[in-house]
Amino acid sequence: MMPTNQPPVDISKSLSQIKEIISKNDSGIIVLPAKPTPDAIAAGTALYMVLTKMGKNITLVASSVPESDMIGVDKIKTDLSTGGDNLIVSFPYEDGSIDKVDYNIKDERFNLIIVPRTGHEKLQPKDIQFTYSGGKIDFIFTIDTPNLNAIGEAYTKNQRDFEGSTIINIDRHLINSSYGMVNYVVKTSSSTSELILSLIRFLKVTVDRDSATNLYAGVAAATNNFTAYSVNADTFEAIAELLRAGAIKKPVNPMGGMNMNQFGGNPFMQAPAPQPMSGSFSQPPVQQQQQRPRNEQQNRSLPQVEKSPRAPEGQIDRGSIDDELKPRIFSDEEGIL
């Protein structure tokens, strides 16, 4: 059963429990909320990099991959799995590009044979990726997530995995329900990234430049570039530590991901107002300027989702050839080669 109505968190005790869980187990998952803030993305990716550096088998998961240029976002997956013994060979695929998938065993080697369909390019080795599935989940970190439903499909489709694992809940939300077996929830913290930095310190792992850069961006986004009421001396001490670790400062949009603002990188700076022209020339009256009505786009109705039209008479329905485009699977016994 998941604990409820727990007393205020004992930070030192929570950090000790997390360290013990990590030291005794090898495989775990870090889960982000369905709509992660830059702070959540920064905290999750930094923790992923640190635990990976410690030699742990870690998977970073979200219901959908967020748009962000933070380091490590490309590691985010949408399936709840970690390692395992099942080898997965994956490569880019276009509908109808593969004619046959075959295999044989020669000289004590298992050969997987992928035959492209005529007119399509052959598979390039650089496009092939190898991963594993079927591994055991020893622990689950939930990041910046007030309750499990906030995770979205990654939770609703895998509830049994959550129920059978040790959940470590790291968050700062006032409404966090302390649903974890370990709850590192500090509601007075100005960012979740600061909590991750404290955990890294406790684990005695060196913060590298990539982790520092992400955590700096997370704190900056969560605090409106250090102007939020929750910012205190601890916040600036954390920032100083991250800068000493080599953090690269990047302008951050608190409502989205990192972005380079065209006005010197300051998101609070507005474009200068246009200056009136001097001399004998003057601007034409506003009424004479050819401009679109101010609310023209707002008044447009949103397009309705169109259903796929049926094929006109005399043309082949796409659905009727789907099976023809799928690659056929053969074994060596059928004598294909």
Image (cartoon, rainbow, N blue to C red):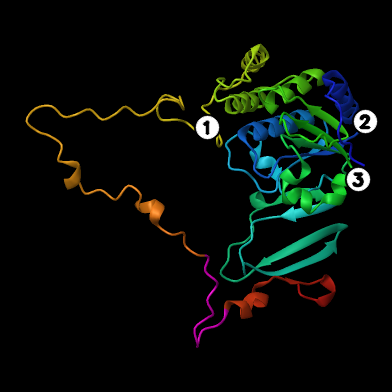
Q: Marks 2 and 3, Cα distance to the nearest angstrom? A: 17 Å
Say above or below: 63 vs 311: above
Kindly identify which residue carries mark 1: 253
Which comes sooner in the sequence, label 1 or label 2? 2
Q: At x 43% / y 59%, what residue is drawn?
A: 301
Using the rendered view, name the quadrant where residue 229 is placed. Answer: top right
Q: As rendered, which of 41 and 108 lies closer to the eye?
A: 41
Where residue 107 sits in the image (x, y, percent)?
86, 59
Q: Would you say the residues marked 2 and 3 are in contact, meaning their CB atoms lie under 8 Å apart?
A: no
Residue type for callout 3: Gly
Quadrant placement of the C terminus: bottom right
Using the rendered view, name the quadrant where residue 186 is placed. Answer: top right
Q: Is residue 264 visible?
A: yes
Kindly identify which residue carries mark 2: 24
- Callout 2 secondary element: helix
- Callout 1 secondary element: loop
Disc 1: CA contacts within 10 A as few (<14), some (14-19) or many (>=20): many
Which comes sooner in the sequence, label 2 or label 3? 2
Q: At x 76% / y 75%, what residue is drawn?
A: 336
Residue type for callout 1: Asn
Where residue 158 sits in the image (x, y, percent)?
81, 51
| Boundaries of the magenta span | 305-317
Q: Would you say the residues marked 3 and 1 are in contact, meaning their CB atoms lie under 8 Å apart?
A: no
Q: Which label belongs to residue 164?
A: 3
Q: As rendered, which of 246 and 126 lies closer to the eye?
A: 246
Disc 2: CA contacts within 10 A as few (<14), some (14-19) or many (>=20): few
Residue 313 colored in magenta in the image: yes
Q: Is residue 54 visible?
A: no
Residue 335 colored in magenta in the image: no
